[in-house]
Image (tube, coloured by chain):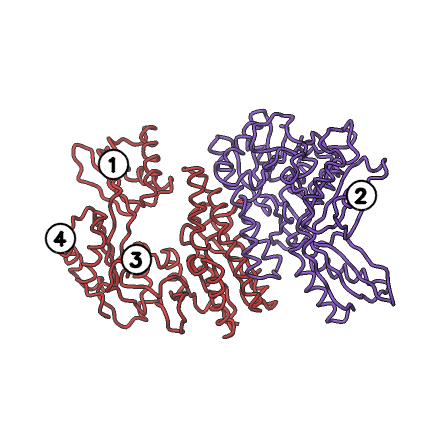
Chain colours: A red, B purple
Amino acid sequence: MPLLVMKFGGTSVANLDRIRRAAKRVGVEVAKGYDVIVIVSAMSGKTNELVGWVNETSPLYDAREYDAVVSSGEIVTAGLMALTLQEMDVPARSWQGWQVPLKTNSAHSQARIDEIGTDAINAKFGEGMRVAVVAGFQGISPEGRVTTLGRGGSDTTAVAFAAAFGAERCDIYTDVDGVYTTDPRICDKARKLDKIAYEEMLELASLGAKVLQTRSVELAMRYKVKLRVLSSFEEQSDEAGTLVCDEEEIMESNVVNGVAYSRDEAKLTCLSVADRPGIAATIFTCLSDAGVNVDMIVQNISEDGRTDMTFSCPTDQVKRAEVALNGFKEKGELNFAELVADTGVAKVSVVGIGMRSQSGVAAKMFRVLSDEGVNIKVITTSEIKISVLIDRKYMELAVQALHDAFELDKAG
Amino acid sequence: MPLLVMKFGGTSVANLDRIRRAAKRVGVEVAKGYDVIVIVSAMSGKTNELVGWVNETSPLYDAREYDAVVSSGEIVTAGLMALTLQEMDVPARSWQGWQVPLKTNSAHSQARIDEIGTDAINAKFGEGMRVAVVAGFQGISPEGRVTTLGRGGSDTTAVAFAAAFGAERCDIYTDVDGVYTTDPRICDKARKLDKIAYEEMLELASLGAKVLQTRSVELAMRYKVKLRVLSSFEEQSDEAGTLVCDEEEIMESNVVNGVAYSRDEAKLTCLSVADRPGIAATIFTCLSDAGVNVDMIVQNISEDGRTDMTFSCPTDQVKRAEVALNGFKEKGELNFAELVADTGVAKVSVVGIGMRSQSGVAAKMFRVLSDEGVNIKVITTSEIKISVLIDRKYMELAVQALHDAFELDKAG
């Protein structure tokens, strides 16, 4: 039988009524003749509650225990979803990550998927089960401990299942009805895109557009998984939402297709670092080992053999970064005068495949921000994106001005 | 190193402060030189919330999904307890039932323990771990699915670990400071017992004294596990609480040592059942297969080849019993006129090893109730206990009158 993967996020399974509603959507696909693998998140708020408890108990927690605790929310939803489907006479059962098994490496709290076992679930499909409900976000390490894939890891779980089982499509049900040119909450001219290229989606996701997790888009791109983002709160046709696909499938496109932002950024600067070969490697290996997700990096011009090294990371990792770098300093492995943190910044980016063939996008972006009186603190660019770090108070203004300037409210 | 098992119930781990308090108690035993296996329940209220969701989703639920959902609460506490101990510099890690593994049969929602693997945990003790925190109440079936041991199964988990690992003692920390002659909430003359025999504790537990789960006492009796019940809310000496032990260790004892009650009982009667050999077997096999825990059974005198069959079960299993029996009736496997349920009854019992050698206890009990105007609906007796089913509204009155009459406020 043809197979679909359907993923329901936290708000789509926030309570028993919403679980029923999601189960009905699954029932529609089963009635069409699909076997379905449903990936569920924790009921909204649950994971935050669990993470809060862990942080309060142990600020620098053992990530193996963190994983054991926070993975429990998805287990609850999976069981309740299976029961709801059974009540609708749809043969269903739940699976926890270790039962599938979804095998990962041992990088607790941000594990990577090594392999998904398909035998057990396929055997049950063979026995007449129509829906396998899988707890998202979790797997099992080579040591037999529970791992999690990082926040939003349920999207990644869904795409990985779609690839492993050769699913016809992977539908991501969420609380928005598709991918927008920017966040409609801060720009009322935001427009829904019918299609978006994997690479654009990848940049938007990594830049904080919270519709899809970066890794899920990477995986979808690598395995050519047709990915559809759509709302679980509206009646849906087969053409609803936004299809994330190959750029060849998109006929025409604007130069810029999206403006993204990330509110919770912090800028850290190591002042007066001894400027010698390998120093950058030392700093960023230290941060990487401490589990800090460094984003932008800037090195000042060297003066008297000393330099300033600036980088950005999520605000909630600032403490971790400080502990790690000051620890290295105390051990004499790193020599810098002071570590300065600015937690009042935000990142704004413009993204578009069209940039590859069109010049002047960066200049236009900087001009727009300058005209609004917004000072740029850090710049990074890639083939299809330009990002700037600015004071957080100007974030919304910057997004709106860029959306207007690049005419994103008009279809390409 | 000598080993202790310490079990903390739901109220003892109700929030992060209480988990810290419990962890400190564990730390005291570790400082004395013990390796410790800690068994934890879910934070109080959590299991009820999960059970409520399951019941609302599917009144006649698939017990395999029920188990997957309700076992998640203990996982959370185990992880948080391990983190708390780590913060106190006590080497600790958490274990879920399937990781130990605690192997059970496949009787989901009331599984029985087949075997506890000791190798993995002992290996970690050998590496310097001092505390293994184990999620109580859960195990793994031969099919690889999560099972639960029934409500209160964390006590059973604790005793089973004490037996499997040859622990010196099994301390059950709870919200009361020991075992009382009756429930102090409904009888202010209730007196704490310093020691109680396994068999008396067994009867009291099975009769609804909620201090310990029946099966945990059975297990403790079979494997001679020294079991201590004590409060997690008071500073404790080594002699605190109540020791559950062999009757030989108890010097003197009253004839009656406890008055127990069970509030949520229901009385069901199959009216006009065809009275033929095997009919009782048919009825109670049907109920057993449906997972109904039948307690008392009474059969009326047969008349014209028909009889009435009365039994009691917990009120929350009445629907299940009705569905099962009416289903059998429709299939023609059972012939009765009507099934009548009375959900307004309670059970009151007196318990004492002294009854074995002293007669007249039953007569005295019935006289006391009669003097208070309490009508007895059903009677059952065992070697060391007498139980009656009465209208629920007389329950507290009956308990107090019996406690007075048998002078339980005075030490034996």
Q: Is residue B347 left or right of residue A330?
A: right
Relative horizontal placement of residue A307, taking residue B71 as reference (left or right)? left
Q: Nearer the viewer, residue B27 or B89?
A: B27
Q: Position of residue A180 (x, y in %)?
A: 29, 64
Judging by the rendered image, the residue that carries numbered circle 2 is: B367
Residue at numbered disc 4: A370
Q: Which chain is mark 3 on?
A: A
- Whichever of callouts 4 and 1 sits on the residue coming sooner in the sequence is 1
Three-letter code for the amino acid on which mark 4 is drawn: Ser
Q: Nearer the viewer, mark 3 or mark 2?
A: 2
Please tell me whether mark 2 or mark 4 is closer to you in this view: 2
Neighbours of disc 1 within 10 Å: few (<14), some (14-19), many (20+): few
Say which residue label 1 marks: A340
Q: Amino acid at mark 3?
A: Glu
Gap in angstroms between the C-alphas marked 3 and 1: 28 Å
Task: Kindly identify which numbered label has been placed on residue B309.
Answer: none
Q: In terms of secondary structure, where does tag 2 sit? A: helix
Q: What's the residue type where badge 2 is placed?
A: Arg
**Badge 4: how crowded within 10 Å, few (<14), some, or many (20+)?**
few
Q: Disc 3, disc 2: CB below 8 Å?
A: no
- Residue denoted by label 3: A203
Chain letter behind tag 2: B
Of A246 and A172, the residue lying toward us? A172
Callout 4: SS: helix
Tell whether label 1 touches label 4 (CB within 8 Å).
Answer: no
Q: Which badge, 3 or 1, comes first in the chain's sequence?
A: 3
To the question of a shared chain for discs 4 and 3, the answer is: yes
Residue ranking furthest to the left: A371
| Quadrant (top left, top right, bottom left, bottom right) of the N terminus of chain B | top right
Mark in front: 2 vs 1: 2
